[in-house]
Image: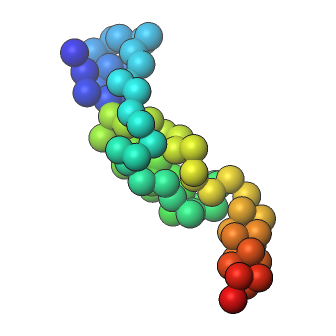
Amino acid sequence: MPDSVLEAIRMGIWDFEPEKLAAVEFEATRALPGSDEKLTVLAERLRAGIPLWHPNDRRTYEDVHEELHSENRKE
């Protein structure tokens, strides 16, 4: 059985689904969607055979802006 989507493709297994992992088993990224940094993270996840998307991955610029704004209110 392949360990990643890339291995599955090489083996001709087109309906491969990686094992489900809990979000605590791999780290979220603060990289902006579409950035070189985010693409690097996605490529690393793909090679490792883990899900491409983490529920806490940064989705928009506002994600971090709102986070910083709420931290400033706490101080």
Q: Position of residue 52 (x, y in %)?
A: 48, 39
Q: Residue at x 42, y 54 (%)?
A: 27
Taking 71 as reference, is 4 left or right?
Answer: left
Pick the front one: 41 or 12:
41
Residue at the outermost bottom position: 75
Residue at the outermost left position: 1
Q: Residue at x 71, y 82 (%)?
A: 74
**Above or below — where is 24 with respect to 40?**
above
Residue 16: quarter of image: top left
Q: Residue at x 52, y 44 (%)?
A: 54
Query: How many labels were placed on the picture?
Result: 0
The answer to whether one can see residue 6 in this image is no
Taking 12 as reference, is 72 left or right?
Answer: right
Q: Can you say which quadrant of the picture contains the C terminus?
A: bottom right
**Above or below — where is 13 with respect to 75?**
above
Taking 31 as reference, is 69 left or right?
Answer: right
Q: Can you say which quadrant of the picture contains the N terminus?
A: top left
Residue at the outermost front position: 74
**Above or below — where is 37 with respect to 13?**
below
Q: Position of residue 72 (x, y in %)?
A: 73, 84
Pick the front one: 40 or 45:
45
Taking 67 as reference, is 25 left or right?
Answer: left
Q: How is the image coloured?
A: rainbow
Q: Position of residue 55 (x, y in %)?
A: 57, 44
**Above or below — where is 65 with respect to 7?**
below
The answer to whether one can see residue 29 in this image is yes
Pick the front one: 20 or 48:
20
